């Protein structure tokens, strides 16, 4: 038992260290004040035949950037077919439930050109509509920012880190069309340039969390044991005076992540225990869906 408790505490300190690194390095898309004229192809991905892209298109038209072409990718259409319609030097993939603010496209181009990136993935800020969304949608940001030091992603050539979020992805067209998946990649927080208003769907959210772990079942199970079950066991077996450090680290982590993602820190701290229960259920649900899908493919 003592060995397990030490493992929980060590993992908690490591997670806190990553969160602190992200907080101090402030990995957000900045406002650079430069203006460009490169043609940008925006691909709006519809996930359902009833999706309405009008709000997103209106926000694109309101941009301070005019050299834009918009391609709407239907849910039944392949990505390759949609990309084949584009003529821009850059390709911006946006989910239909995102809204973008002025300055986004200029800042994306500036960042990609300055750092010679092939892919820039932006983690959108989230809009909440009700208690259930507040219990579910902060979880992906919580996992991402206490497991992945975003500023270090650029040192890797593995785009798997960038595909943990697909709501806003900005490619060099030449890199994407040549299927170069080993180019320079960066992941940044949206800094209020992109908002996502997700529809509440338990299965959808659970499947979105797995890519953060590289779809590795073993990694998910270890995370659940150390992050969800671990603090409960520590709480049961130790006197309150010994809980100041672990729960203080959890509290500070939630505060820092909330400020990074422009969420309410008080609400996230207050809802943390319930969110962890939701996280447990979502990850188990995602694993179940993954197992069933694998079995069906084998059959």
Image (cartoon, rainbow, N blue to C red):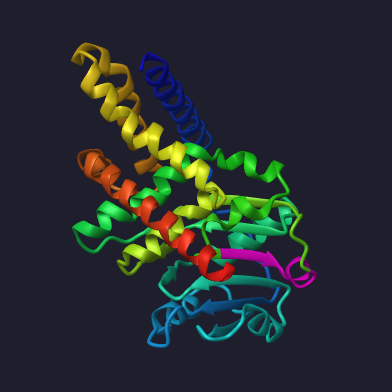
Name the residue rendered at 19%, 15% in the picture: 240
The image quarter in which residue 228 lies: top left
Nearest to the observer: residue 200 or residue 34: 200
Residue 175 is inside the magenta segment: yes
The image quarter in which residue 237 lies: top left
Name the residue rendered at 60%, 70% in the picture: 92
When the figure is inspected, residue 35 is found, relative to residue 150, above or below; the finding is: below
Range of magenta residues: 169-178
Is 214 on the left-hand or right-hand side of 208?
Answer: right
Residue 274: where, in percent of width, then height?
A: 22, 44
Is there any visible trace of residue 33 in the rendered image? no
Name the residue rendered at 76%, 73% in the picture: 177
Residue 81: where, in percent of width, then height?
A: 66, 85
Residue 67: where, in percent of width, then height?
A: 64, 79
When the figure is inspected, residue 224 is found, relative to residue 184, above or below; the finding is: above
Q: Quadrant of the N terminus?
A: top left
Nearest to the observer: residue 204 or residue 2: 2
Residue 293 is inside the magenta segment: no
């Amino acid at each position: 038992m003592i060995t397990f408790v030490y493992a929980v505490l060590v993992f908690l300190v490591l997670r806190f260290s990553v969160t602190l690194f992200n907080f101090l390095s402030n990995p957000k898309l900045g406002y650079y004040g430069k203006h460009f004229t490169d043609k940008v192809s925006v691909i709006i991905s519809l996930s359902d035949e009833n999706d309405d892209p009008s709000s997103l298109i209106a926000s694109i038209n309101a941009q301070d950037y005019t050299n834009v072409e918009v391609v709407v990718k239907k849910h039944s259409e392949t990505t390759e077919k949609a990309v084949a319609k584009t003529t821009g030097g850059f390709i911006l993939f946006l989910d239909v439930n995102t809204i973008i603010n002025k300055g986004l496209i200029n800042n994306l181009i500036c960042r990609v050109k300055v750092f010679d990136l092939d892919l820039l993935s932006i983690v959108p800020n989230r809009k909440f509509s009700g208690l259930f969304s507040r219990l579910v949608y902060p979880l992906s940001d919580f996992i991402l920012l206490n497991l992945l030091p975003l500023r270090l992603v650029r040192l890797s050539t593995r785009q798997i880190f960038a595909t943990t979020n697909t709501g806003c992805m900005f490619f060099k067209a030449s890199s994407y069309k040549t299927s170069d998946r080993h180019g320079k990649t960066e992941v940044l927080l949206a800094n209020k340039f992109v908002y996502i208003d997700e529809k509440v769907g338990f299965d959808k959210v659970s499947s979105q969390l797995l890519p953060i772990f590289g779809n590795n079942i073993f990694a998910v199970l270890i995370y659940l044991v150390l992050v969800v079950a671990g603090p409960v066991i520590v709480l049961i077996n130790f006197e309150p005076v010994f809980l100041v450090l672990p729960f203080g680290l959890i509290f500070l982590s939630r505060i820092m992540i909330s400020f990074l993602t422009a969420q309410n820190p008080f609400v996230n701290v207050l809802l943390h225990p319930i969110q962890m229960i939701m996280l447990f259920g979502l990850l188990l649900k995602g694993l179940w869906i993954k197992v069933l899908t694998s079995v069906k493919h084998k059959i």
